[in-house]
Amino acid sequence: MTNKGVLIVLSGPSGSGKDSLLQQVIANGGDIALSISLTTRQPREGEVDGMHYYFTTREQFEQKLASNAILEHTIYNGEYYGTPKDAVDAQLAAGKTVVLEIEVEGAANIAAQYPDCVRVFLVPPSLTVLRQRLIDRRTNTLEDIERRIAIAKQELTHAPGFDYIIRNCVLTDAAADFQAIIRAEMLRDKTILDEVMNL
């Protein structure tokens, strides 16, 4: 018997370490399915289309919106980001733990459509550390970094509304916390009692 999967929404400011966290969880053997977002922003160095994001044009994105093929979408820093719906539903139906890495507004949209989803907010050790992480990326201008810090301050005000908050001081510890959340949520599944009673 395949149980319905767990949908986890991971949010946090740009530079809080969401990508690194998920890579660490996978390296630890965590069995998670990552939803790949569609975006109109340009790829960063090393990003691969279809692996990190699906990169598309604004016109193509808007066509998908019109055909209801996007589960949720938002505009962040002037660019579209969205989640393809069909892939998420198929993975959940197969019993997978599906992780959506999306920003705060998108997380609220997902929660409205999937009330059972688990929302996790990842925070940096401090805003000073966050600023340095963004500088170290060497992909943004100082003006853009300050804009992202301002956005981060606003996003952090939404953190108390999430189910869990993880402070990413040490990546391996944060990944262990994330995996503990997944395990705890899987143990909420009451359908296991049906299996026990039918043995």
Image: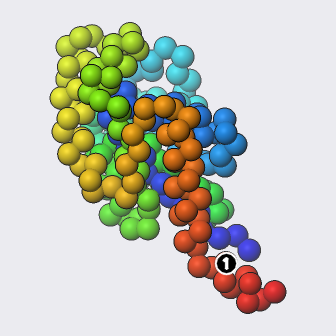
Residue 151's image quarter?
top left
Can residue 68 be seen here? The reply is: no
Front position in the image: 174 or 99: 174
- Point out residue 33 in the picture as x, y percentages from the top left corner: 60, 48
Q: Secondary structure at mark 1?
A: helix
- Identity of the residue drawn at 33% across and 55% down: 162
Q: Residues within 10 Å of mark 1 (few under 14, many from 20)?
A: few
Residue furthest right as drawn: 199
Can residue 111 be seen here? The reply is: yes
Quadrant containing the N terminus is bottom right
144 left or right of 19? left
Front position in the image: 120 or 110: 120
Front position in the image: 128 or 134: 128
- Identity of the residue drawn at 32% across and 25% down: 130
Quadrant containing the C terminus is bottom right
Amino acid tagged 1: Ile
Residue 195's image quarter?
bottom right
- Identity of the residue drawn at 44% across and 62% down: 117
- Identity of the residue drawn at 77% across and 89% down: 198
170 left or right of 66? right
- Point out residue 139 in the picture as x, y percentages from the top left corner: 37, 13
Front position in the image: 192 or 64: 192
Q: Is residue 61 above or below residue 180?
A: above
15 left or right of 179? left
Q: Is residue 66 above or below residue 163?
A: above
Residue for badge 1: 192
- Point out residue 3 in the picture as x, y percentages from the top left corner: 65, 70
- Point out residue 57 in the picture as x, y percentages from the top left corner: 39, 29
68 left or right of 32? left
Q: Is residue 86 above or below residue 112?
A: above
Residue 28's image quarter?
top right
